[in-house]
Image (cartoon, helix red, strand yellow):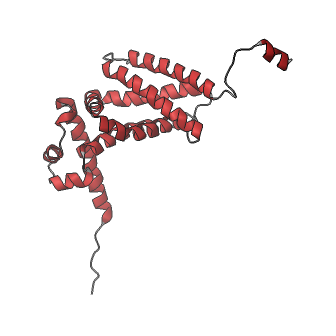
Amino acid sequence: MAAKKTAKPKPRAKKDSSLKDRIADCALDLAAREGWEAMTLPRMADAVGEPLGAVIAVFPTTSRIASTLLDRIDQHVLSQVQAVDESETPRDRLFEVLMNRFDALQRHRSGYVALIQGVSRQPSAILLRAPAIVHSMALMLIASGIEASSPLGMARAHALAAAYGLVVRTWLKDDSADMAKTMSALDKNLSRLEKMQSMVLARRPARSSTPEDGAQEG
């Protein structure tokens, strides 16, 4: 007697992955047209022509859709990194990596602007997303050849996340074709981070010299 054929998980996994991408693509298009606030799971089900339950199984909440879309930016940037160019300074490498990030956002500008603005109006969503942003910045540091796993490295990631948030604000308003304002803001904020890092790495805090100090050192 012939054995029964077992279910094939690979095609199903491929279908689930495809559905995830279709939902994310539709969400980005809808956000571009109507704003992120228009996003609902029933609308996504209608857009992709799938049962609501199938959509919920992939994305239980719209915030999960937002996270997936933002994770795509990480994936795109990292896919461009072949090796660390030691001939460049760490700052220049980080600048290039982060500009690749803005290039990726720019490709679907209307959708990502709507997404970021929509999430920014939800304090709870910002708090939930904060650890992921720090993680993303740690990845950007590592991709630039900068250590980001030690306590100091994590401090760098948190500082970079704050600086990146400031640059994103500029990008949201930057309507130039070459993102000149964004590049200028990124350059300025990375310069500030360089100064902060030199302070963090100092062996001891600087202090003003006094006659007593001079006597002791002499």
Q: Which residue is rendered at x = 44% and y = 38% of the image? A: 136
Residue 81 location (% of width, % of height): 50, 36
- The image quarter in which residue 53 lies: bottom left
Horizontally, residue 43 falls left or right of residue 179, namely left
78 or 171, which is in the foreground?
171
Residue 121 location (% of width, % of height): 27, 30
Q: Determine if residue 118 is in view.
A: yes
Residue 87 location (% of width, % of height): 62, 27
Above or below: residue 176 compared with residue 115: above
Residue 105 location (% of width, % of height): 34, 30
Q: Quadrant of the N terminus?
A: bottom left
Horizontally, residue 151 falls left or right of residue 17, namely right
36 or 181, which is in the foreground?
36
Q: Which residue is rendered at x = 22% and y = 34% of the image? A: 36
Above or below: residue 82 compared with residue 181: below
8 or 89, which is in the foreground?
89
Taking the view exactly as shown, the residue that stands out farthest to the bottom is 1
Above or below: residue 67 compared with residue 116: below
Q: Quadrant of the C terminus?
A: top right
Q: Which residue is rendered at x = 40% and y = 27% of the image? A: 165
- The image quarter in which residue 47 lies: top left
